[in-house]
Image (cartoon, rainbow, N blue to C red):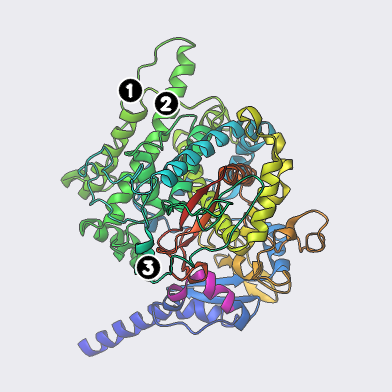
Amino acid sequence: MWLELLALLVAAVVVYGFNIRARWRLRHIPGPRPQWLFGNLFDLGKVGLHESLPRYARQYGPVCKALFGRHPIIIVTDPDLVKQVCIKQFMSFHDRQFNMVMMGGTNTEANCTMRYGMLPAKGKYWAGLRASCEPVFHSKQLARYAPLMNVAADKLAARLRRAAAAPSQDVGAQSKGNDGTAAERSAPEIKDPQCEGSLDVRHQSDAGAAQSGVDPSEAQSIKFDRSQGSQQMDGSQPGGKREGRMGSVNLASNLATMTLEVIGTSAFGVDFDTDKEDSRIVKEARFVMEPPKNRNNVNRLGSLLAPDLGLLWFKLSSWMGAESVRGSFSARGYLLGTSQVLLRNARARLAAGPGKATPAEPLPQLKSDSLVGRVFGDPDLDIYNKAKADAQRDYGSADAGDISLLHHLMRAHNKETGEPFTEHQIMAQGNTFLLAGYETTSTALSFAILCLIQNPPALEKLLTEVDAFDWKDGKGIGFEDLSSFPYTRAVIDETMRVYPPVSPLVGLQREVTCDTDLGGFSLRRGDKLWINVMGIHRDPRFWPDPEAFKPERFLEGHAEAEGQHPYAYLPFGVGPRKCIGYKFALEEAVITLAQLHRHFTFQLDDSKHPGGAQSLELATGITLSVKGGLWVRPVPRK
């Protein structure tokens, strides 16, 4: 009897681990051989999605499959099939699918971003939400955002100038806790030197370069002798006089801080004070996008391998004191609390009328949605509620500005249902915009500067265009001036072709909503699909010499631009679910890249990256990034 039960249990575990039913149904789609329970996770994780997905496409064709744990994922690497998915058969691939429990918690408010946000929104709710948000990104509104972007770029330039002038100082480093002490966060502090600090300035002497195996006389010897009198890339003046080594900065970290400031003023209508050393909102946004390296992976891995037990893995991680779980509640409480207090303050101001005081009421505290939590307490929600109270303390006297996303949605109605948006739905959009814009634009800008460092002729053309602009009287770049920077825009476009910033884990995934055929293969409702953007962007069939950096591909009149496949370039997706804020992101990217090169050129920090640009290791998470950050030296131009 016991032997039979044991055999039955073993058989059930084997069948569950191999997910035989799903694999048999998709047996007609080729792909790498999966392992029990783990699928192809080891292969995907070893080199990253940015390398493994293009390799699968080369080996198995434009439609193939891989197993993300037990979950079969159909991988599409063909522009014509992308058109089918995103345009022609859109209603068959309308939605995205996210694992709610894996994202943390079951409480409606704590998880509202994953329930009501633009990214996971489905059906009529998504259609009405999208239509209601589109006016925020019309040209008239974009023109109003341009001055805010210029101010943020100027602040970043000032920080970089301080770094170059004072290489031995740690200017603006954020190494304190959330309130200036190490005790603010209930979970342990992150001690990661790569993402700690808003400036991350470090000193590199010639001796330090020698210790790292780099000859200081050879490092970054490419020179740019411009009539504008810019310094050369080896740190010398155009006349040949050698200057001291410049301060080194984590460029990605600094750019992310700048984009967060832009989001604060545009989406929320307030100054987030991202320049402050103890900026809480910077720390919390960074925690969400860059989880600690020593995080407990029980929840993450368990949800992949056995999603049916997702709530168990989540609670187990919490009970084990996992920093990724406890820290996520603090981050989520503070970010959502910020949206909530700004929204409530704006509503109170409108209700009271102009010039009248609107005392803020305490934000509602979340209560556990489980019997155990109600009886014995829930430490996770305690962290969440404390973070909400901190947000009210920091923003209790502010409210969403008139041009902000929150203010717009406060007055809007869902154009499909006709109903006003609930508080949680508006909070979800604010949080979605904050996190989506925090790292994607900064990642694209980081890679753009890296590509310019590697390609001196492209940098020379960009500097010529920047210098030709009328910068007199402190004039910034207006929305109407963007047409004066076609090459700068082409640099950004080509950068996002070579290094598409968004992972298929987030934006470029779809769920099959009804049985259909794609590329000769039958798909059923519920199947998951990823669009392999990196594979398409570097496919020689669509991009001659795909590994080369050629901004000219995107200049009007160029042969490649004229013959470009309309669905072979997908940094923001395509079709009805294309990123709603793509124009905002491009505006910010052009303004920032031009403003920075008005003041600086950049050299790669040879001590941090001793093998040069070719030795940089990439990592795929929510976005594509350089492992350990991209460290550069800003070289001031005269």
Q: Quadrant of residue 11?
A: bottom left
Discs 2, 1 touching: Cβ within 8 Å: yes
* Amino acid identity at mark 1: Glu
Residue at image coords 26%, 60%: 317
Q: Kindly state the secondary structure of the residue where label 3 is placed.
A: helix
Q: Specify start and end residues of the magenta stretch as a single range.
A: 44-56
Disc 2/disc 1 C-alpha distance (Å): 9 Å
Question: As displayed, is residue 52 above or below residue 276?
Answer: below
x%, y% of residue 40?
A: 45, 78
Figure quadrant of the N terminus: bottom left
Figure quadrant of the C terminus: top right
Disc 1/disc 3 C-alpha distance (Å): 60 Å
Checking the image for residue 361, the label placed there is: 1
Of residues 412 and 262, the one nearer the viewer is 262
Q: Kindly state the secondary structure of the residue where label 2 is placed.
A: helix
Residue at image coords 65%, 36%: 477
Discs 1, 3 touching: Cβ within 8 Å: no
Disc 3 target residue = 210
Q: Nearer the viewer, mark 3 or mark 2?
A: 3
x%, y% of residue 389?
A: 29, 33
Q: Is residue 48 left or right of residue 381?
A: right
Disc 2 target residue = 344
Q: Residues within 10 Å of mark 1 (few under 14, many from 20)?
A: few
Disc 3/disc 2 C-alpha distance (Å): 57 Å
